[in-house]
Image (spheres, rainbow, N blue to C red):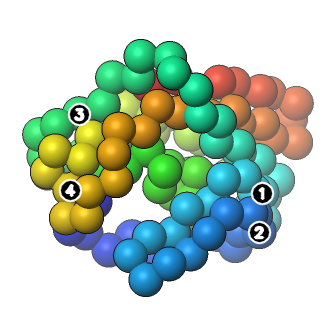
Amino acid sequence: FDHRVHENPYAIIGGGSITERRTDVSDGVNEFGLMAQKLTFKNGARLVDERHPDKVQLAAFELIFYLLGHFKSVADVAAHLNQIELMSDVNADVPFGYSEQHFVLSDPTGRCVVIEP
């Protein structure tokens, strides 16, 4: 979304879809046991319209793929969550609609969290 290339340092296995224009992982686990699931429902999600170069800006459908590829645990995600913004498609290269989603994460420590934008 933010015109940057992100290379995932961690291996992921999961379900979802890959097309020419997008990778959409709905649920999965990485090599450290961090597990994530994307859930869709009308919850009044607040997404960002404007680009901010100091943030990692992602479409909501990209979040699971990014988190599993970059973080080892729920604590690791929590420590870096303020660096990530979920974007509307107002300034997207490829329009994707308004994604009303929330996310569930858990790890081998037993910690489980819900992220609601």
Residue under numbered circle 3: 48
**CA gap, disc 1 to disc 4?**
27 Å
| Residue 21 percent coordinates (x, y) | 38, 76
- Nearest the viewer among 8 and 95 is 95
**CA gap, disc 2 to disc 4?**
27 Å
**CA gap, disc 2 to disc 1?**
6 Å
Quick check: 109 left or right of 58?
Answer: right
Answer yes or no: do the residues labelled 2 and 1 have beta carbons within 8 Å?
yes
Residue under numbered circle 2: 13
- Secondary structure at badge 4 equals loop
Q: Amino acid at mark 1?
A: Val
**CA gap, disc 4 to disc 3?**
11 Å
Q: Amino acid at mark 4?
A: Ala
Residue under numbered circle 1: 29
| Residue 69 percent coordinates (x, y) | 59, 63
First in sequence: mark 1 vs mark 4: 1
Q: Which numbered disc, 3 or 1, marks the residue closer to the eye? A: 3
**CA gap, disc 3 to disc 2?**
29 Å
First in sequence: mark 3 vs mark 2: 2
Q: Is residue 21 visible?
A: yes
Q: Amino acid at mark 2?
A: Ile
